[in-house]
Amino acid sequence: MTAYEQALAEFAPVLGLETHVELGTASKMFCGCATTFGAEPNTQVCPVCLGLPGALPVVNEKAVESTIRIGLALHCTIATWCRFARKNYFYPDMPKNFQTSQYDEPLCVDGHLDVEVDGEVVRVEIERVHLEEDTGKTLHVGGATGRITGASHSLVDYNRAGIPLVEIVTRPVAGTGVRAAAVAKAYVTELRDLLRGLDVSDVRMEQGSMRCDVNTSLHRAGEPWGTRTETKNVNSLRSVERAVRSEVERQAEVLRRGERVVQETRHFSEATGATSPGRVKDDAADYRYFPEPDLVPVAPDPAWVAALRAALPAPPSVRRKQLVAQLGLSDLDAQAMVNAGVLDVVLATVEAGAPAAEARNWWLGALAQRANETGVEPAELPVTPAQVARVVALVAEGTLNAGLARQVLDGVLAGEGEPDDVVAARGLAVVSDTGALGEAVDAALAAHPDVADKVRGGKVQAVGALVGAVMRATRGQADAATVRALLLERLGVEG
Ligand SMILES: [Zn+2]
């Protein structure tokens, strides 16, 4: 029995998941500033999102629409009237000294999301879905860890301040027992797929556009629930699972010693797989919430909400079943992809135009390997299904061979842009120009006259050495079959 299993044989876990999702709107929540990721620091700011005196916010309609669609997809009730609230606290990344959020009047309440764990459906109840604005980003410079401890100074970037952020809060999830960590991961995975299907966010956990706070507590059977800790900003699916495991093990130790778990926020370290204490958690009362006086209430027209409901896409679980059936995948095949965490990206790659077999091979092969090397799930790699489909298309049209395709994907993963950009920048296209190939073929024949003689003498398989020489000379950019045909033609031998 592992330490985790032992802990959950002795104690019952209660989880709570708060997920923040940056909406993919073109402009910010309360002003017209752009939201492009990766822009030069402090270039996407204005008096409103910098909180300058006299600036007045205006609600982004698209953000409200996206939040309502998320609420509807999660089976929530949509408020007919609600207000934004000010959450007052000071932090240097928040220039207004308050965050415009929602408090006791959220836009969506009382929903659920069903997730499958070990073939069994677990219903996760959703307490609320509300809309708020993101904060800026601080960068601590000079320390080893990037944390404020040990840093010589800090820089702040307000580009992210004011980007619309949706917070999705579950009710406490109890009764999961030893499956707690798996349920947490399955919930975040299913939520990510649902959000991707709604096309409201790019849900890139590694870029922080989706991040998760994981609340964990333990209690003995028959006793009241324990004190919870909140592990902040967990930013990969694998880390969600590891954060629950590590917190369960740690709290079990604390309780066994007869000590009390402290209510606090904690940080999860990808490197150690453990959590460490952050600050002692404030209660809601400390934030002095009050209704935002600068914004009119939000009162969505019921007809609009009905239209949004009617236009919702099928949920991921249904879409998955339809696609699996359409592609003629066997249950075993589908299960293998589920286990590897690639089913959705494979299906999305097929939807983007790739043949099922190719999509499956890339995600279960080269990409799964890259993911393993970097310690993330394949779906979390910085490459989109559409980009993989494009690489597959480039191979099909003869621009790339398999080896070059891998190099192109490496380029995409390294942030060099779209597949076509990488092909152009790295000069990776297959050399199919027979003139250029002809020169390389002639050079190989001149350099290896003994091999050429062997082939002429009937040892056709010896041509492989010449093909290899041409491939090396063209840095892998020739099409091997074309090279072989050209060589045999020059040598006057039938293939
Ligand atoms: Zn602005």
Image (spheres, rainbow, N blue to C red):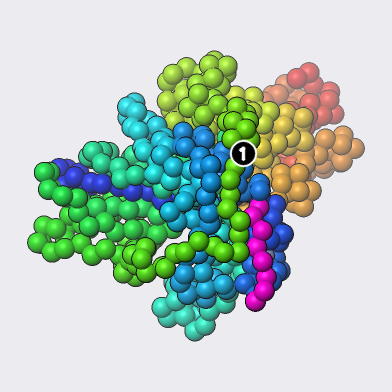
Secondary structure of the residue carrying tag 1 is: loop
Residue kind at label 1, given as amino acid type:
Asp
Q: Which residue lies most toward the bottom here? A: 152
Residue at the spot 41% in from the left edge and 51% down from the top edge: 18
Towards the viewer: 447 or 121 = 121
Circle 1 residues within 10 Å: few <14, some 14–19, many ≥20: few
Image quarter (top left, top right, bottom left or bottom right) of the C terminus: top right
Towards the viewer: 268 or 229 = 229
> Would residue 350 be counted in the magenta stretch?
no
Query: Is 155 situated left or right of 474 in this image?
Result: left
Residue at the spot 42% in from the left edge and 37% down from the top edge: 111
For the magenta stretch, what is the residue range? 53-60
Query: Is 440 situated left or right of 476 in this image?
Result: right
Residue 369: percent from the left, percent from the top?
Answer: 50, 42
Residue 458: percent from the left, percent from the top?
Answer: 72, 21
Image quarter (top left, top right, bottom left or bottom right) of the N terminus: top left
Q: Is residue 459 above or below residue 160?
A: above
The majority secondary structure of the magenta stretch comes to loop
Towards the viewer: 57 or 407 = 57
Figure label count? 1
Residue 486: percent from the left, percent from the top?
Answer: 82, 29
Instruction: Specify whether residue 150 is in view.
Output: yes
Query: Is 237 situated left or right of 246 in this image?
Result: right
Task: Give the labeled residue for mark 1.
Answer: 301
Residue at the spot 9% in from the left edge and 61% down from the top edge: 258
